[in-house]
């Protein structure tokens, strides 16, 4: 057995390259400090202010400094470190974990109060003006970049991710929030422009949660936690407010916009937002509950005033607006409407009732004053309209496709 030899070198200068080749021994490696199980200390290199070598507050155990001073063209990739792990072998199954590089932060019995991570990537602009003009128009600058190559050789029976957050815990954390992805800022005066940005043409489906199925439980589970006022019973939760200030523009919690650029002559339609509830089991709740493809809910409390008595102010759980600018042409049997209610498949017979629009007062004594209301009609075919008696009618104008306009006269006992 070869005898271990130790050398003490105050400073080692290598002007060209240091190459360590594999041999037949059990371990050929470069180690700085030593590893101890269970987060014990005493054998690792100690961080002290004596390591503040450049007086910049950076304490390093191992440092590599490189620089680019000439344009080497896009034929090259310059990096300060390269770690390449090759998994190879004819019909080889690799069950061990394999990584190109690992950064690890081990915390034991401490309180962490600043920035802490197993691995950190930074992008810094300093000195003269820095122009970000990547050859990739969708963006090529980042603190951390994930790149996938060799697509034709990959068979992904399980997903291949550009970024994977893997929760290795066997139990829940003692307290607090565990997030796969989060944003933070040093100053709220300069927040991120976007929390999550997907440039056009870079993905097929922007965000996918769960899998579509009508039999297997492969969707994202919701309603399994009794947390109606938190995010536990929602697949996607968005909580917004007015920042406790007067609005500077119209605001929406979620804004979905689709654009039709090409004449649509096929057999398909488009909607900017779709809610879809599919039922494949009996719905018999023990309390009065609703099940909807889409639900809107407006809640108000406290002491407040709606409207100033002059301007029309409308508060509603849902709104539908119709704007037909330009020079539209509505062909025969075509309808432009603010609200469309259709029944695709309805039961032939039932002891219940199927209706297009249904009004309900959850609490008796707090009924709607009117089932329908309207304002601004000038042809007398609206619902109840305006304060001008010439514009008020007691009939409801209905358009029936293929038939035309018909009027429903309302009577009261």
Image (cartoon, helix red, strand yellow):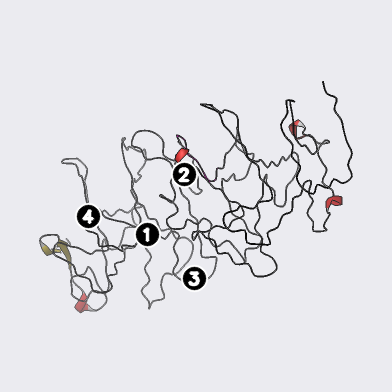
Q: Are marks 4 and 3 in contact (CB under 8 Å)?
A: no
> Which badge, 2 or 1, is on the more N-terminal residue?
2
> Which badge, 4 or 3, is on the more N-terminal residue?
3
When the figure is inspected, residue 229 is found, relative to residue 217, above or below; the finding is: below
Q: Which residues are magenta?
A: 157-164
* 104 vs 153, nearest the viewer: 153
Q: Secondary structure at mark 4?
A: loop
Q: Tell me the residue that label 1 is attached to.
A: 317
When the figure is inspected, residue 301 is found, relative to residue 79, above or below; the finding is: below
Measured in 3D between alpha carbons, the distance from the residue under mark 4 to the one under mark 1, in whole angstroms, is 34 Å
Q: Tell me the residue that label 3 is attached to.
A: 247
Measured in 3D between alpha carbons, the distance from the residue under mark 4 to the one under mark 3, in whole angstroms, is 42 Å
**What residue occupies the far top of the structure in this picture?**
1
Q: Are marks 2 and 4 in contact (CB under 8 Å)?
A: no
**Residue 260, x across and y down, in percent:** 31, 62
Measured in 3D between alpha carbons, the distance from the residue under mark 2 to the one under mark 1, in whole angstroms, is 21 Å
Q: Is residue 103 magenta?
A: no
Measured in 3D between alpha carbons, the distance from the residue under mark 2 to the one under mark 3, in whole angstroms, is 30 Å
> Which badge, 3 or 1, is on the more N-terminal residue?
3
When the figure is inspected, residue 380 is found, relative to residue 28, above or below; the finding is: below
Q: Tell me the residue that label 2 is attached to.
A: 233
Measured in 3D between alpha carbons, the distance from the residue under mark 3 to the one under mark 1, in whole angstroms, is 20 Å
Q: Residue drawn at (84%, 50%), measured in percent from left and top? A: 51
Q: Secondary structure at mark 1?
A: loop
Q: Tell me the residue that label 4 is attached to.
A: 266
Is residue 198 visible in this depiction of the protein? yes
Question: Crowdedness of circle 1 by 10 Å Cα count: few (<14), some, many (20+)?
Answer: few
Q: Secondary structure at mark 2?
A: loop
Query: Dividing the image into 4 quarters, which one contains the C terminus?
Result: bottom left
Place residue 130 in its image quadrant.
Answer: bottom right
From the image, give the main secondary structure of the stretch colored magenta.
Answer: loop
């Amino acid at each position: 057995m070869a005898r271990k030899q130790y050398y003490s070198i105050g400073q080692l200068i290598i002007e060209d390259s240091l190459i360590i080749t594999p041999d037949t021994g059990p371990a050929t490696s470069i180690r700085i400090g030593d590893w101890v199980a269970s987060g014990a200390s005493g054998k690792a290199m100690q961080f002290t202010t004596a390591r503040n070598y450049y007086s910049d507050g950076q304490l390093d155990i191992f440092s590599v400094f490189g620089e680019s001073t000439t344009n080497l063209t896009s034929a090259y990739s310059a990096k300060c470190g390269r770690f390449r792990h090759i998994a190879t072998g004819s019909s080889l199954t690799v069950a061990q974990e394999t990584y190109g590089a690992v950064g690890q932060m081990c915390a034991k019995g401490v309180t962490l109060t600043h920035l802490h991570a197993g691995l950190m990537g930074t992008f810094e602009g300093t000195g003269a003006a820095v122009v970000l003009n990547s050859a990739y128009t969708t963006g090529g600058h980042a603190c951390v970049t994930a790149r996938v190559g060799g697509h034709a050789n990959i068979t992904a029976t399980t997903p291949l991710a550009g970024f994977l957050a893997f929760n290795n815990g066997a139990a829940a954390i003692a307290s607090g929030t565990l997030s796969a992805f989060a944003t933070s800022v040093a100053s709220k005066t300069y927040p991120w422009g976007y929390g999550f940005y997907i440039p056009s043409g870079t993905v097929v489906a922007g965000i996918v949660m769960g899998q579509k199925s009508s039999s297997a439980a492969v969707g994202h589970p919701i309603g399994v936690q009794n947390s109606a006022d938190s995010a536990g019973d929602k697949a996607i939760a968005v909580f917004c407010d007015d920042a406790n200030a007067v609005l500077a523009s119209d605001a929406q919690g979620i804004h979905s916009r689709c654009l039709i650029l090409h004449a649509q002559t096929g057999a398909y339609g488009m909607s900017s937002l779709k809610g879809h509830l599919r039922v494949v089991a009996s719905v018999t709740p023990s309390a009065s509950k609703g099940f909807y493809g889409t639900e809107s809910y407006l809640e108000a409390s406290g002491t407040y005033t709606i409207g100033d008595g002059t301007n029309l102010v409308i508060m509603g759980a849902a709104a539908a607006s119709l704007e037909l600018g330009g020079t539209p042409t509505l062909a025969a049997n075509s309808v432009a409407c603010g609200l469309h209610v259709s029944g695709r498949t309805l039961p032939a017979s039932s002891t219940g009732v199927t209706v297009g629009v249904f009004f309900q007062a959850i609490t008796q004594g707090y009924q709607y004053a009117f089932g329908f209301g309207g304002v601004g009609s000038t042809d007398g075919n609206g619902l109840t309209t305006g304060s001008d008696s010439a514009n008020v009618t007691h009939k409801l104008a209905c358009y029936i496709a293929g038939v035309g306009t018909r009027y429903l006269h309302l009577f009261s006992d």
